[in-house]
Structure formats: structure tokens, C-alpha cells
Amino acid sequence: MKKVLAILLSLVMVVLLSSCGSAPQSNVVNVYNWEDYIDESVLEQFEKETGIHVNYMNFTTNEDMMVQVRANPGAYDVIFPSEYCVEQLMAENLLAEINYDNVPNMKYTLENLLNPDYDPDNKHSVPYMWGTVGILYNTKMVDEPVDSWAILWDTKYMNNVFMLDSIRDTMGITLKYLGYSMNTREPVALEAAKDKLIEQKKSGVVKAYQVDETKDKMVQNEAALAVVWSGDAQYAIDLNPDLAYAIPKEGSNVWVDCMVIPSTAKNKENAEKFIDFLCRPDIAQKNCEEIWYSSPNTGAIELMGEEYTSNTTMNPPAESLANCEYFHSIQDFIAFYEALWGEVKNAK
Amino acid sequence: MYNVSLPWWAWVMMGVGLAVFVGFIILSVRRNHGVKRSLFASPYTLWMIIFTVVPCILVAYYAFTDANGAFTLDNFRHFWDSNHAKNELYATMGDEYAGYITRGTVNVDTLVYSLWMAFLCTVICLLLGYPAALFMADRNMKIGATIVVLFIIPMWMNFLLRTIAWMSLLEDNGLINSFLRLLGFEGVQLMYNSSAVLLGMVYNFLPFMVFPIYTSLSKLDPKLGEAAQDLGCNEWRTFTRVTAPLSLPGVISGITMVFMPSVTTFFIPRILGGGNTMMFGDLIESKFLTEGNWNVGSALSMIMMILILLSLGILRKADPEGEGGGIA
């Protein structure tokens, strides 16, 4: 309802402004973000404090967003791609370099997320939210400590494991389990991961391959173990205190959703102001508390205090992140992955 | 990644396709109804062109071209050998990788599995649907009209919602299993397998079988049955000699309307089957959305469309007048 109202209001505002002809084009910022990925009161606050009007638009997948950004140069000033898409957009020369003189709040960014290998020196991207992939398990059904991906292959948990129906993540954790990089293009490693996944499926451990359904089913005690994203894990743990989340010692994936400015942006300075605003600790705190993904903002983390810092799902200790990797774009290699994944899904 | 700027010959192909289609519609309507009436068909013709003909031509275009828009038959090789892209890479890597080159049967297996599931679904729907339609059409049964309403009411709800509702019934801790445990029985696993997928398909498509049969049965003149009985037929012979043959168009139409959506089913395998087995619809979806390979996705769609057209053609032979009121 709030959303509908907000949309209606912004429509009314657009109509009013355009009919008066008094909307100066220079004072807008066109923001293209994921659906449900911000505390919307933050947008109003930004407009009030700076007088810059926010045109707020949404997308639901990285791939949709990339198509739109390529097709409409100049339509967006700030976009929110995941890290492997930042890499892809950079390769296509679609991103502008950010002038950090205008983004002083960048200083609050967590050190381990700075200077990432997808964007050395953060020339083009500022982290917005981040998270991990790990194992969500039910402490009533799992007695042993969960610290290795091997537990997903343990036949003790017959028909009791939910895997992710997502090529990159599932192949990625299997590669990690076997001691390879998640970004390897080495055919022997990839074939080995495929065989391992087929072995797992044939052994009868896997109950289902799913994405969005997993979190609610874990809340209802439908399975002992599941591969999930940390955001989903936090959601499930809030609803069922028997659940716990762990990042295996072999390492996993760390993902980062970033804020970037397209090279074709018409309002680059406003875009930098907007990014700086979202990096302000009180604003970053609002957004983090609205969507409950991990915040990259040390200022916000300090404001949230004990409740956040003691939460190992949201705020994993440095040692469990030690072996983690970012994904790199494999768009030119995806047919190879797809062929392997098809064989896993086809195994009976 | 994909822009829709087509080469000149694709536009020519589309133009010719449209012209032939429009010409065909206008000619056939004029022949049957004269010039004035053909005008009434124009909104529908326009609709068909924009939403049926153009997409079909685009699918054909993508199926026969590669990512750069050059003509190729490679996409159909992908169907036969799901490892095609992988094998091509191995072929360039030298002898030590030769052992990895194998034909991938994923696409063909999935198609066979989908056809088999669609066949089972159609047979079950027919076995359940025909008696139901008989009851509904029987004028002596007061309850008939009630059954019609009971069949229609669930269709007011979106099929995704109905399928998700089945999930909460069948889950290990769902309603059915909770009830069984309450009575002191062991729980049983009802979900995450092919039977659950089949159940979901039958549930969703049963009305498409029942209603065409019901329509053709209720159009039957009851006097025909009475006449057969006057001439010495017992109830069973009246059914096999009179009622059943005359209801055949409805049956044909029902079979078509169940078989077609069954083959192309997706979402149900993911929700009720737990993603453990893919159907052809899921495969096409992943080609488009995950892999972003519109060319192979289109080739797979075309193969499925051709199979459906073939089965329609066969069914049309059985019901040349199209009396079932369906689309056959």
C-alpha cells in the first residue's frame, strides 16, 4: 500500500511539475535499483535535504538491468549491479569513474570489501550491500558441527538436503569443496564438480533443487540442511530459532551489490551526491534494517551495535571469509556450465 | 547482448509471411461471407498478426541464426547433442581431452520425458473426465449442475496459486502428513517426485478435458438414446453404439486441449517436483533466462511447436468437422 501510494504520489508530482514546466532538468537523479532494496523514506529524505528530485526505477534481475542500461544510454544516473556485472559493464566501457571528492562517506566502507579484484581501487563502484553463500541447518536434526561442504554429501541426511537451483552457486560450492576456485575454467575441475553433484543426486541425499521456496520450507522443518544466501538465512533464523547458518571452511562465495554511475549519465554530480548520501551511516543503517542484508558501512555497523556485531550470519568473522571468493563474469563460457548442469538435472 | 536489429532478409521474410497470412484470411472470409463481413474479421486479424505471426517468425529467425545473425543449423545440433558447445571446446584442446567428448542426451531425454508425462496426464484426465462429463450432462441427475459449478470455481483462481496450495498439502509437514501423524500413522513423502508433478498436471488440466466432452454430450438429443433402447439396445450397447461415438469430437478436442499444455508444462515440476526433473518447458526457460542463448532456446521451441502441429494434424484426421468446438 505504501508503495502504491508512493508511486501515485510521484506520478502526481511528475504531472504537476511537468505541467508547470518548472522542473529543471538539472536537478534530478535517475536511480535504477533492485525491487524492494531500499527503505523508501530515505528517498524523500534525500529530496528534502538536497532539493534533487529522485526518479526511482526498479529491476528484478541483473540480466534485465544490463539489457536496459545498454539499450537506453543516458536514462540512468545510479544503478545497482552485482559485482560480476560491474566487471562486465566495465569491460564494455559503460561505467564512469567516480570522483571520490564528492563521496567523502566512502571512508566508512569495510576494509575487506575495498579494492576488490572485480574493480581494483574501486574506481567505478561503491559497495551497497553484501552477503555470503552458506549452509542453513536445523540444530534439532544436525548434531555435529557444520564446518564443511562435505556434510551435504553425507548419506546420514538421506533425502534431507535442499540444494540451490542455480548453476553458478551450486557448481561454485562444489568446486570449492573439491579445492578449486569458483571461477575456474579448467575443464577437468568442472567435470569433477559435475560428477560430484551427480553422485550426490544419485545417492538420494538431495530432496529438492529450489531457490525462493527454500527459506520458508526450512522454517517449517522440511529438511535438515540447505544451501542458501545469507539474507535468506537471516530471514529463516528470525522465524525459527532452531536454525543456524555456517560458512564452510573450504570457503564460499561473497557477493556484493554495488552502486555505479553509467558513463552516459546526464547528472553525474547528483549521482555522486546520491551515492554519498546512501553511504552516510544513519542512512546506511536505515537501509540495512529494512532489507537485512549485510552492510558494508562501518559507521552503520557501529550505530546498530551489539545486535548486529554479535550476529555471525550478518557479520561473519574474518576467518570464515578467508577462503571466500567473488564471482567473475563467465557469460562467454556459460554454455559449458549449462551443459554440465543439464546433466546433473537429468541424472536419475 | 541481443539487439533486435535484424538483417534485411529477415524483414523480407517477415513481410512475405505477413502478406501471405493476411491474404489467406481475407480470401477465405470473402469466399464464405462476402466483402462486408470480411471487415469484421480485421481486428482479430490484426491481433493474430501482432501477437501470433510476428513472434513465430522471430522464433524461426533466431532458431536458424547464430549470435551474430548469420544463418546456421548449429542450434538444432545443440538439441541432438546437449554437450555440443562443450565438445567443440574439447575438440580444440588436443588429444588428452578426447575422452571427455560424449554426446549429451539431456535435451532429447527431457523431450521424451515430457511427452511421456503429457501422455500419462492425458490418459488419466480422460479416464477421470469422461465419467464426470457423463454425470454432468445427465438431465436426470439433479447434482449435475452442482458438479459443473464445482469444476468452474477453482478456475477463478490463478493456476500458480492453486499449485502452491498443493505444495502446502503435500509437504512432509504439510496438511495431509500432519493429519496422518495425528491418526498415528507414519508420514509418507508425497512431494519432490514425478508422481506429484503428474498430480499437479492432472489437477490443473482436468477441466480442459471435462468441458469439451460435457458440451458435446449435452448437445446430444436424448431421443437418440431412447430410440436405441426402443430398438432393443441395453444401456451398455446404447452407450457404446450411440453416445460414445457421438461424443467423439468432444473427446478429441479434450485430448488436444490437455495434451498441448501438458507437453509445455513448466513451473509445476519446479514447485511440486522440487526441481528434481526438468520438463521441456523448464529447459527452454533456462536456455533463454539463465544461459541467455535465444538461438538454441528458439530451436528447442520450434521443435516442440512442430511436434504439437503434427499431433494436431493427426487429431484433425479423427475429427475433420471440428465439431468438438475445440482448437483441433
Image (cartoon, coloured by chain):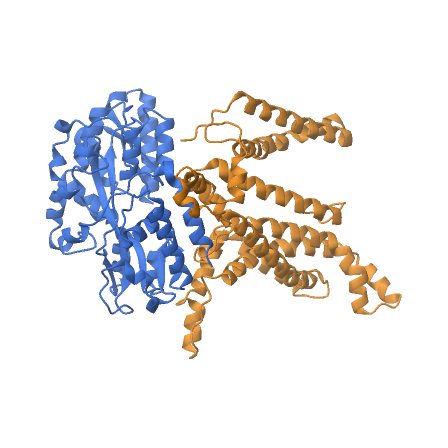
Which residue is depicted at the point 51% across and 22% down? B7
Q: Nearer the viewer, residue B95 or B235?
A: B95
B261 shown above or below B233: above
Q: Please count the marks in the image.
A: 0
Q: Is residue A120 left or right of residue A189?
A: left
Which residue is depicted at the point 49% across and 38% down? B296
Percent of width and height locating residue A259: 24, 35
B4 shown above or below A245: above
Q: Nearer the viewer, residue B78 or B10?
A: B78
Q: Nearer the viewer, residue B47 or A133?
A: A133
Q: Is residue B253 left or right of residue A166?
A: right
Chain B rendering hue: orange
Percent of width and height locating residue B288: 45, 40
Residue A96 in view, yes or no: yes
Residue A24 in view, yes or no: no
Residue sticking out furthest to the front:
B95
Residue sticking out furthest to the right:
B231
Residue sticking out furthest to the bottom:
B184
Q: Quadrant of residue A5?
A: top left
Q: Quadrant of residue A149?
A: bottom left
Which residue is depicted at the point 57% across and 58% down? B202
Chain A rendering hue: blue
Q: Is residue A147 left or right of residue B182?
A: left
Q: Nearer the viewer, residue A258 or A59?
A: A258
Q: Quarter holding the N terminus of chain A?
A: top left
Percent of width and height locating residue A226: 32, 59
Percent of width and height locating residue A95: 26, 28
